[in-house]
């Protein structure tokens, strides 16, 4: 995929600088790799941490803080999609994983696997997108690595990010805390990221442009914690979508989950796209949505806090935790019939993140 300079300028969230005229070639280390790192990565991510030009970065966490640590790799295809790109996805995905532990994200690392011949304008767009996403999430990219592989050995660009955050609370936010009676709240409408990727991948045109919901949710989670609300479990709805996520929690918590289909927010354009392509929105990945398990007495307060945030405006209570004979997820359909919502077999949409 090669984008024009005009398209790049229109879509880029930061001012355009002249990107380095370096041709990516396998084995092109030494001067060329140094120029790429200096003129692109350090120019965009520049900070005192990166300026040390060392193999690792030393940082001091807040005193007496508990730390959360996570890592993830991103291979999404196409690398640029409506509502984001692999750069913003890599930052937001790792920030959100930290947020699901109730952690405030602090620092990220970034590792790049670049295919020989990758256009410099595309790489620069992705780098600036990562910078913008990191600034929005309030995190710093403080260390990283770059490798170039032969043409055909990768698909343009793969990114690995690892993140460190600090927990400023004493709650045990995990499936082990889920209790019978907990209300399940979804932070917003589901299925947009997966459908945005599919539309771009298959060159499909719908009446409305479906944009990915890719966004950092740490600030929204922080507001729930600041409000003093008890959060038993949080989980973002990535690969496998809501259905797979809830099945994983049900099995880990050894509890049942009962959903009500009419309460689950799905945009009409997403619903139509899913029907056209034969997908169930419950299994379609999101990249800026999560479910929260909260005690029944906290549910309305949690809903109020979430709806006051731009990323939680369409938050809804969609079900509750029950105690069935075996852990599973069931759902009351639109016609009032209960059915089992199984874990997806295989991967419905490969290379979605």
Image (spheres, grey):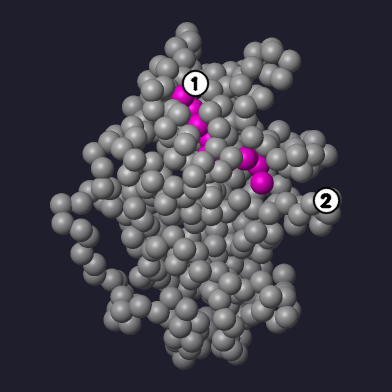
Q: Position of residue 29 (x, y in %)?
A: 48, 84
Q: In what element is the residue under mark 2?
A: loop
| Residue in the picture at 68% in, 19% down | 333
Q: Which residue is mark 1?
A: 320
| Residue in the picture at 39% in, 63% down | 139
Foreground residue among 300 and 154: 300
Q: Is residue 301 visible?
A: yes
Magenta-colored span = 183-192
Image position of 163 (left or right of 281): left
Foreground residue among 137 and 324: 137
Foreground residue among 45 and 303: 303
Up-down relation of residue 293 to residue 206 (above or below): above
Q: Position of residue 239 (x, y in %)?
A: 57, 42
Q: Which residue is mark 2?
A: 206
Lower sequence index among marks 2 and 1: 2
Locate the N terminus by quadrant.
bottom right
Q: Is residue 160 visible?
A: no
């Amino acid at each position: 995929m090669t984008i024009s300079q005009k398209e790049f300028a229109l879509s880029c969230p930061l001012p355009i600088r002249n990107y380095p005229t370096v041709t990516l070639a396998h084995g092109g280390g030494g001067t060329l790799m140094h120029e790429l790192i200096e003129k692109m990565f350090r120019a965009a991510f520049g900070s005192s941490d990166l300026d040390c030009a060392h193999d690792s970065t030393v940082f001091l966490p807040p005193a007496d803080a508990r730390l959360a640590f996570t890592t993830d790799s991103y291979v999404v295809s196409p690398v640029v999609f409506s509502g984001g790109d692999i750069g913003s996805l890599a930052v937001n995905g790792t920030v959100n994983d930290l947020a699901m532990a109730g952690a405030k994200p602090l620092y990220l690392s970034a590792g790049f696997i670049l295919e020989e011949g990758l256009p410099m304008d595309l790489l620069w767009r992705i780098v600036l997108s990562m910078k913008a996403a990191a600034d929005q999430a309030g995190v710093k990219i403080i260390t990283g690595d770059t490798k170039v592989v032969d043409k055909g050995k990768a698909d343009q660009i793969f990114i690995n990010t690892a993140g460190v955050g600090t927990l400023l609370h004493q709650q045990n936010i995990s499936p082990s805390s889920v209790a019978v009676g907990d209300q399940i709240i979804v932070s917003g409408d589901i299925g947009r990221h997966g459908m945005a990727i599919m539309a771009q991948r298959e060159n499909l045109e719908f009446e409305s442009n479906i944009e990915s919901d890719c966004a950092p949710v740490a600030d929204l989670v922080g507001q729930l914690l600041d409000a003093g609300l008890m959060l038993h479990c949080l989980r973002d709805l990535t690969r496998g979508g809501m259905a797979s996520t809830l099945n994983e929690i049900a099995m880990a918590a050894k509890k049942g989950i009962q959903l009500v289909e009419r309460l689950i927010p799905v945009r009409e354009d997403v619903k139509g796209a899913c029907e056209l392509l034969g997908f169930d929105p419950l299994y379609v990945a999101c990249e800026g949505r999560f479910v929260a398990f909260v005690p029944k007495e906290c549910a309305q307060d949690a809903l109020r806090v979430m709806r006051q945030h731009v990323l939680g405006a369409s938050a809804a209570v969609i079900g509750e935790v029950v105690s069935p004979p075996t852990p599973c997820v069931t759902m009351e359909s639109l016609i009032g019939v209960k059915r089992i919502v199984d874990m997806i077999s295989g991967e419905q949409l490969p290379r979605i993140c």
